[in-house]
Amino acid sequence: MTETCATQPGAPARPAAPAKRYSPIRSRWPQLVGYATASWSLIYGLLGLYWTFGGGGFPFGTEHDPLGAKISILERAEPATAGLVIAVLGLAGAVIAVLIARRPAWGPAGAALIGFAWTMAAALAVVVPDYRPLLAVVRLPMFLIFAPLGLTQGVSLADFFPAFLPWPVVNQILMMAGGALWAASAVAYRRSVRDACGNCGRTETPSGWSTPARAARWGRWAVHIAVLIPVFYALTRWAWALDIPFGVSREELEKEARESPGIWWAGAMLATMAVGGAILTRGLVRPWGEVYPRWIPFLRGKRVRPRTAIIPASLVAILVTSAGLMYLRGSALGYLSVDAQSWGMVVPEFFWPLWGVALAAATLAYHLRRRGQCRYCHRS
């Protein structure tokens, strides 16, 4: 029966307006992310034009980013040339992102679009940034944790932040955000052409590797790798804090301690944070990663929301991958020397890209195990 609503006495009844269906913004992200990506690219394209014609604030090159010498992949960039490249890629990327958002049919053109999207995602998220975004994220919380415990004698904020978030570092963080948008656009596009659910990615015929049982198996291997690498890194830094020349000569250990008092304790604190992250990574395959254990006040016995683990783990995966690629690049270009007397300085960091990939895989496996039935397509 059609519902009616009253009007004036004697007036004919009229149908009631249908109730509006609430659609949360997160349910519409597959339709909106392409336009968000286009907006980001347009802004950077316009900035590229601004820098090309002499505008200030160019964030690359040693003249504008002196701390990027020998660590930034764009240390030799000049505004006139690099700015033009940024303008072309940004403006072209805005157009391509709109095409992706409009969901053209799959084919050679579609393959080119998704290839461009993934290339932009990788370049912006892990290739162009160096290790400074990672330092910005982890060092201040680490100092705030250890300072009240009296474990930071001789270590000041200057040991943690040679320069606190200058514009070139903020720009790298913004580029990482752009890379995440490009990756999300590529995922949404791929799901669309596969006739999969835009929110969960499931199709009528599920992929064997993405079932919870299969994800649990390969996810364990990914967790093992993502735990061992930061522990290996931490062993070297803890040894140096204890005046043990593990992976470095005694002369180098004492020289660094004289030139930068407190540097090894700062490194040990960062190593402790890395091990803490490794312990949390174990939670991706342990029961306490799904239900809070008894020793956590106020939360014991409550269900762990998946995003509580997925968001920070994904962020760390991106940060350590970009930092590790910087070390590999520095070694390939001859900026970093590796020998039997000083391998501990850089060799542990060479494994960081593998750490990032393994952590990303472990996080994906955790998501696949815990996502449950999709609230939009009702597949499980």
Image (cartoon, rainbow, N blue to C red):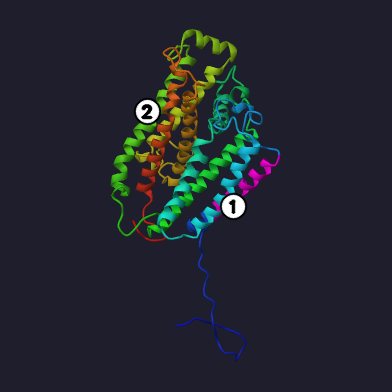
Say which residue label 1 marks: 39
Q: Residue 56 at x, y = what percent?
A: 71, 38
Q: Which mark is residue 228?
A: 2
Q: Residue 12's quadrant in the figure?
A: bottom right
321 in relation to 25, above or below: above
Query: What whole-number distance in Å separates the C-alpha atoms at marks 2 and 1?
Result: 40 Å
Q: Is residue 270 magenta?
A: no
Q: Residue 356 at x, y = what percent?
A: 43, 35
Magenta extent:
35-54
Residue depicted at x 35% and y 36%: 222
**Of all residues shown, which one is farthest toward the front?**
81
User: How many neighbours does mark 1 have within 10 angstroms: few (below 14), some (14-19), or many (20 or more)?
Assistant: many
Q: Is residue 46 magenta?
A: yes
Mark positioned earlier in the residue sequence (2 or 1) = 1
Q: Is residue 197 visible?
A: no
Q: Would you say the magenta stretch is mainly helix, strand or loop?
A: helix
Task: Identify the amino acid type marked 2.
Answer: Leu
